[in-house]
Image (tube, helix red, strand yellow):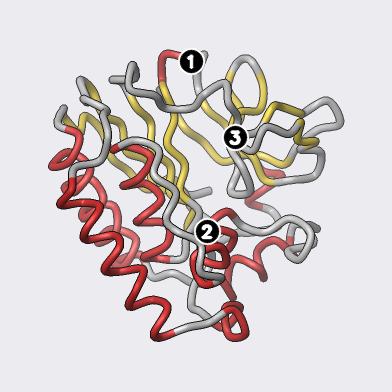
Amino acid sequence: MKVQLDCSVSERLPQFSLGILQYNNASVSDSPKMLQGRINYYVESLRLDHDTANLTEIEGVREWRACFKQVGIDPSRYRPSSEALLRRLLQGNPFFWINSAVDVNNFFSVLHALPFGIYDVNHLAGDITCRLGHANDAYEGLNGREVNMEGKLLLADGNGAFGSPIVDSKRSCVTEQSSTLLQVIFFHEKMEQSKKEEIVGSVGRMFTEINGGELTHFSIVTA
């Protein structure tokens, strides 16, 4: 499965990149108590260090809001998924447990203040392109709402749009029946290459520690 950046994105965000990780034979289940404890501990420390008043000054949140503005998205109307997660937690809401794959994904999204996506490869068709949305790009989001993706940063396969740093689609969501997975990290323009490589490495290690299986491919996709 090839993942590429379309010129509609790279012309506006020339330093934008994606971290790509592919897993085979993963075993998705309820998150183990060890992971839940680690995440809950991190959330408590996060609340001690930050509140919603200074949320937009967190490194990653600030840079992603700037990226959205550069491609013509209002970040106050359509928040990056990482910012939305952080905001929810800082408002005192609990971490929303889904399954061991999604929970690890969301933990890293909060930890690094970067949008992360995790997708069931068996529900995807052909190669993947990261581009700006067309007039007919829409899907049912994980939030249960129909999302119009025109002009928004998204991932598309042979069947159209399925993912975004705003909200992902139900079509490609990971369940306990999923075993072949694609993980995408949306890196903002200000992040150093060495930091991207460090994040990809740590994500791959922890993901397979929790979910088993093999990390069969990892790369950083640039224009």
Residue 163 appears at what percent x and percent y? 58, 35
Q: Which residue is at 16% across, 47% downward?
A: 205
Q: Which residue does the numbered mark 3 point to in the structure image?
A: 142
Q: Residues within 10 Å of mark 1 (few under 14, many from 20)?
A: some
- Which comes before the other along the chain, label 3 or label 1? 1
Residue 5 appears at what percent x and percent y? 56, 41
Q: Residue furthest right?
A: 135
Q: Which residue is at 64% across, 38% downward?
A: 143
Residue 161 appears at what percent x and percent y? 66, 28
Circles 3 and 2 in contact, beta carbons < 8 Å: no
Q: CA distance from mark 3 to mark 1?
A: 15 Å
Q: Amino acid at mark 1?
A: His
Q: Amino acid at mark 2?
A: Leu
Q: Which residue does the numbered mark 2 point to in the structure image?
A: 85
Q: Is residue 53 above or below residue 81?
A: below
Instruction: Quadrant for residue 53, please give it.
Output: bottom right
